[in-house]
Structures are given as C-alpha cells and as structure tokens.
Image: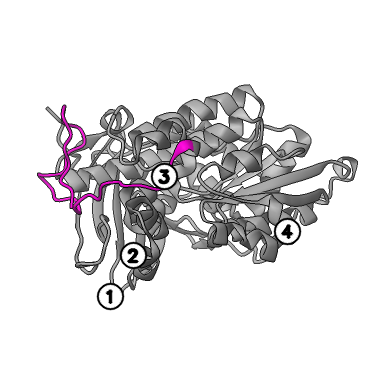
Amino acid sequence: MKEPMQDCNPNSSSVSRRQFLKSSSLAAASVATVVSFPTILHAQAKKTINAVIIGIGGRGGGAGKNFLDAAKAVGVDAKIVAVADIFPEQAGRGMKNFGLPADKCFSGFDSFQKALAEPGVNYAILATPPGFRPPHFKAAIEAGKHVFMEKPVAVDGPGCQIMYATAEEATKKNLKVSVGTQRRHQAGYLETIKRIRDGAIGDVTALRAYWVNGGPIWHRAEQEAKATTDLERQIRNWYHYIWLCGDHIIEQHVHNIDVCNWVMGAHPVKAWGMGARQQLGNKSGEIWDNFAVQFDYAGGVCLHSYCGQIKRDFSSVSEAVVGSKGTSDPKGMIRPKDGAPWRFANQGATDPYVQEHIDLINAILNDTELNEAKQVTDSTLTALMGREAAYSGSVVEWDDMLNSKYKYGPELLYTDPAKMTWGAFRTLKPPMPSQHDIFSDKVELPTV
C-alpha cells in the first residue's frame, strides 16, 4: 500500500541546508562552474571538433548554430560534417543551413548510424523527438563520441534505464556529455542557487514550478495527412504521441522540474497529480493539455508543479523557492525576510544556449569532468512519475517509475531502431484516470 502524500506543512517538514548540501554533489559541481566569457585556449586551438547533428528540425538546426558560435568563442576549429534525419526533406536542411554536400545529409531510420560512422567525428548533437534519445545516446557512446543532447532524454521507464546505463558507460570511457537543460549553464541561475545553498533564504520549505502557456502547442494535422502509414503519421506530428514526446509535462516542463531538483540536490520520492485533455478536443493524438502535480521530496518538502498548453489569459514559465528566512526566484532574485532584496545584474553573461556548448567544448579540450546524463535522467524520470500519477489517478513512487517495464514505443526502438520500418502502430486513447495503469501485471491500455 502506498504511503500517503505529505501535508506540505513548512513548519513541520523542511530540508536543512546541511542536508541538501550533503546530498547534492552533482548540483554543487554545476554551481561551481565559472560563469564568464570563455578564455581563448590558444594551446588547444589546433584540435578540430567534428560534429554531426542527429535530428535536424528547428532545435537541431539551432543547436548546430549554437555549437559553431561556442567553438568560435572558445577559439577552436570546429565544423559540422554530417547530419541525419528520418525524413529526406529534413536531412536536406544540412545543405541549406551548414553547406554540406548531399551525400553527407543522411535520411532513414538508420541515418544516425551513418552519421556517427563518418571519419573524424568526435561530437554528436542529438535532437530528434525524445523517444529516440535513449538508443541514439547509447549508439553515440558506443561509437566513442562526446555528446550534446537535448532534453528530455526518455519517455518511459525502460528508456530511462537505457539512459542510466549509458551514462555510466560514458564515464567509464571518459566521454563528455552536456544536455540542453540550459538553465544549469545560465549565469543568473548559477549565482542565485549558489546563494540559496549558502543560506540566503534559510532552509528550503517548499517549491513551485510553472510551464503554463497562454495558448496551445502546435498541431501538424496537415503533416499527418501526407503520411501513408501509422508510424509516419505519428512521427510527422510527434508532439502529440506519448512514445515520441512523452507529453508536455516531460517535453517542456522538465526544465522547471530540473531547476527544483537542482535546488534540492535530490529527486522527489513520490507524486500525485491530475490533469485533462480539454482544448485539444478531437484533434489527433494521445496527450493531455494540462497537469497539476504534487511531488514529495524525502524530508517533507513539496514541489507544486503546474503546466498547460491551453488558451488562457495567464501564462508563466518560472520557478519559486520558499525558505525559512525568505523566498527566491532562482533565475536571479533573493528576497530575505530581513534585509534588502538581491537581484542578479550581470547583463553581459553568455547566451546559455551557447554556454552549454562552451562548457562541453572546454571539458573536451581540457579533459575535465562533465557528464550531465544522470542528472537530466533524474529530472526526466521525475516528470514521468508525475505524468503517470496524473494519468492513473494514483500515488506513484520513484521506484515504481524507475522499474516500470511498460514500453510506450515500438519494441525495436529499445533494441535496434536502425531496423525500424514504416508500418502499422497502435494509437492510444488519451489516458483516463482509473483506466490507464502501466504498473499492472498485464498492461492493456485502451487504443483507438
């Protein structure tokens, strides 16, 4: 039987600064990162970084540009030597965006293997829909490449299990890994969270996270209409299918959840939540458009999490931390109960989308430790725990989610995605609490 959720009484349950500092070596390492314009590494300038982009949609193309800007800032020779995408028209962006020849713009389910096999490649940018992240990360590490990958990094428990195992392999191989949780590389967050850890607001007693949009997320019905198979239809409108996107609590809200885990130096141990599919109506897809979740950390601190993709007047993408001696917006504000407020004022800080590549390039050049795969998998699994708590209508514990066996995607996605082919694949009915339970002994989720 599940333990009940916490009452979230800040007077009776809080995590002391000593407790969360003790349990947060990974986050402390992030806070210790020096935030400044990069030093030109003249001694290393002859080293060339050859990158490939796997998944060249909007974010993949943007990450490629961020990589080139970072390399220029650091002073290292760098180039993008190949791109890969399932769709030929997407892969063709490599010619337009990066001046690649057509024979270096690979397409198909096995295109990631072809890109990784290009001679001299030592840097892989992974930016496909999140469902493909675990097998592509595994392939990149097996091929001996340093990795920058976009968040989130999985859509279910089996995907997270691949991520955790591959993160350990990356460490064993001394491969550097950075992730698109850019707030961990953003000057204002770094300085503010350092101050929180130094006791600026006392003991943390509660947290709040928002990714509440004032309008719906995109829906590519016209792209689905072009498809000739179920799998193609879903991938062309990938945000609306759980096995590809994870739902927006995973795909977008993981940013805010990651900040809260960073502040705590830990992940929650259980979650309960609710949500609905209200304004998506009869549009194709499986996902919801709003979630409200309570996450409980060990020691009694609660995170109240809200995310939505609904047309409304109110919107906010933010986090808040409540402490025994004040409050904080971890992006750059401290408000103590006694004394003057503090605001981060370094307006000249590097764009965090570029800084995350700068940090990875410097780790490669200087052979310093950098592997963010575990921390982002922790935050991804946190969001998954909240999603399944809301989908099922039950309290879900960390180990439930970590050890879950239900695979939302096709079997080959987890074993050999290069062998996937266009064909039939089921579409789930949008989850209904009391009817959607991936933790039962025999999972048979309702399908359309």
| Closest to the observer, 84 or 232 | 232
Q: Do callouts 3 and 4 mark residues in contact (Cβ within 8 Å)?
A: no
Magenta stretch, main secondary structure, is: loop
Mark 2–mark 1 distance (CA, rounded to whole Å)? 9 Å
What residue range appears in magenta? 419-448
Location of residue 28 in the rendering, given as x and y in whole percent from the top left corner: 55, 37
Residue lying at 20% horizontally and 40% vertically, measured from the top left = 6
Question: Tag 2 or tag 3, which sits nearer the N-term?
Answer: 3
| Residue 212, label in figure | 2
Whether residue 372 is visible here, answered yes or no, is: yes
Which mark's residue is nearer the viewer, 3 or 4?
3
Q: Do callouts 2 and 1 mark residues in contact (Cβ within 8 Å)?
A: yes
In this rendering, position of residue 367 left or right of residue 44: left
| Residue 389, label in figure | none
Mark 1–mark 3 distance (CA, rounded to whole Å)? 29 Å
Mark 3–mark 4 distance (CA, rounded to whole Å)? 28 Å
Is disc 1 placed on a helix, strand or loop? Answer: loop
Q: Which residue is under mark 1?
A: 312
Is disc 4 placed on a helix, strand or loop? Answer: helix
